Amino acid sequence: MNSPDRRHADTAMSAYAFDAVVAGNCVFFLILAIPCIPVWQNLSWVASWLLLHVFSRNVFQKKLHWAAIVFLASFTAAIPWLLNASTDMQLFWLLIWICVLLVIWPLRFLALGEVTTAAIFGLGFWVGSFSLMEGSFDSAPLALLGASQSPMPAGRLCGIFAWLSFLVLFAESFLRDISLYEKHKELQHYSLPVLLGNLMPSIDRLWAASPLLKRWMYGFATLYFIAGILLLAFFL
């Protein structure tokens, strides 16, 4: 059995699976968007999202001085594409910022943090990415719900990546919270596993004794990268 210190260290490392998928989303978009938008706009979009993710990590870990710096960096990185974006896209970016802050508080205390975070960096990222390539925000959400309806190969891939990344990010967040189950319950941090454990005693006993699930987390992330590479190879 792992010692408490080893368990804590392994649990801290497990967050990198989520980080890897977020970075993978950005890499896949960089490739997809090459023929659709200027390189500077592509890089500005990706940099602003990556820094937004780093900002959320810093605030969640209460590294507020770094969070303030990263916030300014993320806003600065977004300026090039924001200046050339439609009003709808500018409002979309503002909504994403608000949602990130809601995840940090209060949604993570209402057992909604896992779903919302996966939706922001999975579905939200690809909805905005597809809108950026199409030049219109209005049809993007509907096009992603039925990705095959898009005449663009890149548009169809955006829809597939949106749902795949959402599912992988949610699974990673959920499994990581199971690994932190006892700590979350002690601190009254109402993650989704804690909520389910409170409702069902059998699940509470199962998750309280569960081993670390780091291998599963990294496994999901690896499968996502393999799927993404294959999709890019076959469809582009």
Image (cartoon, grey):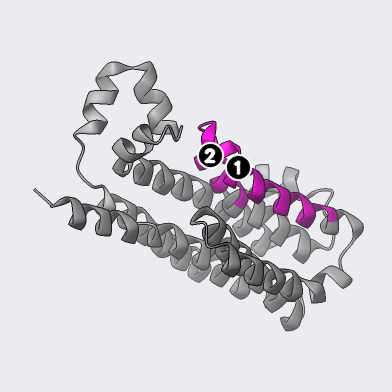
Camera-nearest residue between 10 and 40: 10
- Find residue 121 and report its horizontal and vertical position in percent: 58, 54
Tell me which corner region of the image, top left, top right, bottom left or bottom right, holds residue 48: bottom right
Q: Answer whether residue 102 is magenta in the image.
A: yes
SS at circle 1: loop
- Find residue 32 and report its horizontal and vertical position in percent: 63, 70
- Find residue 190 and report its horizontal and vertical position in percent: 46, 32
Q: Main secondary structure of the magenta part?
A: helix
Magenta residues, start to end: 91-120
- The residue sitting at the left extreme is 1
Camera-nearest residue between 40 and 158: 40
Tell me which corner region of the image, top left, top right, bottom left or bottom right, holds residue 9: bottom left
Callout 1–callout 2 Cβ contact below 8 Å: yes
Structural crowding at the residue carrying mark 1, measured as other residues with C-alpha within 10 Å and reported as few (<14), some (14–19) or many (≥20) = few
Q: Please give the name of the residue rendered at 53% of the width and 40% of the height, measured from the top-left corner.
A: 113
Q: Is residue 174 rendered to the left or right of residue 209?
A: right
- Find residue 234 and report its horizontal and vertical position in percent: 50, 67
Question: Can I make out residue 126 in this image?
Answer: yes
Write down the residue under mark 2: 108
- The residue sitting at the right extreme is 87
Give the amino acid type for the residue marked by disc 1 in the picture: Trp
Q: Please give the name of the residue rendered at 82% of the width and 53% of the height, measured from the top-left corner.
A: 137
Q: Which mark is residue 105?
A: 1
